[in-house]
Amino acid sequence: MKKQITVQYKSIFKYEDHQETMKCQGIGEIEQTPQLTVISFQDQDQIIQIELHEEHVILKHGMSKLKLVKNKKVMNHYATDYGMIELTSLLHMIDTKNGIKMKYTNYDHQHVINEAYVLLTYKEYHDETEYENETVKEIIN
């Protein structure tokens, strides 16, 4: 079953000579089954989706898609503004308690392209009218 959630997302990409940070907050969706959790939300004009499988993670951002497996290098085809590039990704750490925390490295052959850090927190979404309706029910009863 899908539920609406409020999402706070931050990713940091550390390159050799600079760092890029992306922050996003808004309303998204979470769908959970015993084998899979999918979190989706929108960042400006692109959908970000994180799929937490039992053995791996799939990160989707617009047309880009990364498969990550803890402590294992995985070959990916990654979409950029300049076209598709082939890179290898290694997931070093993932923590799914109280949201999602991840650290992974992207490689071009054996050279490090960047280190990436992802932090996502979420909670169930309640709009103001829902709270107002609950308050009215409490007063009436």
Image (cartoon, rainbow, N blue to C red):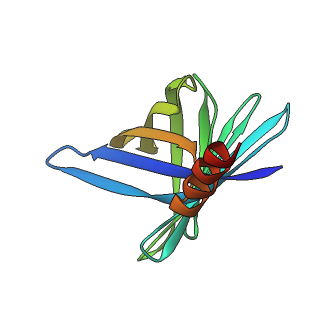
Near-viewer residue (51 or 91): 51
Residue 60 position in % (x across, y down) = 59, 57
Q: Is residue 26 left or right of residue 137?
A: left
Residue 43 position in % (x across, y down) = 45, 66
Q: Is residue 141 left or right of residue 121?
A: right
Residue 111 position in % (x across, y down) = 36, 40
Near-viewer residue (99 or 133): 133
Q: Is residue 124 above or below residue 97?
A: below
Q: Residue at x 58, y 48 (%)?
A: 135
Q: Quadrant of the C terminus?
A: top right
The image shows a total of numbered marks equal to: 0
Q: Is residue 100 above or below residue 131?
A: above
Q: Residue at x 56, y 52 (%)?
A: 131
Q: Is residue 82 above or below residue 61?
A: below
Near-viewer residue (77 or 62): 62
Considering every residue shown, the one lying at the far left of the view is 17
Residue 67 position in % (x across, y down) = 64, 45
Near-viewer residue (30 or 38): 30
Considering every residue shown, the one lying at the far front of the view is 140
Q: Is residue 54 left or right of residue 99?
A: right
Instruction: Mark yes or no: residue 61 visible.
Output: no
Q: Is residue 126 above or below residue 70?
A: below
Instruction: Mark yes or no: residue 136 visible.
Output: yes
Q: Residue at x 32, y 55 (%)?
A: 22
Q: Is residue 82 left or right of residue 16?
A: right
Q: Residue at x 55, y 57 (%)?
A: 132
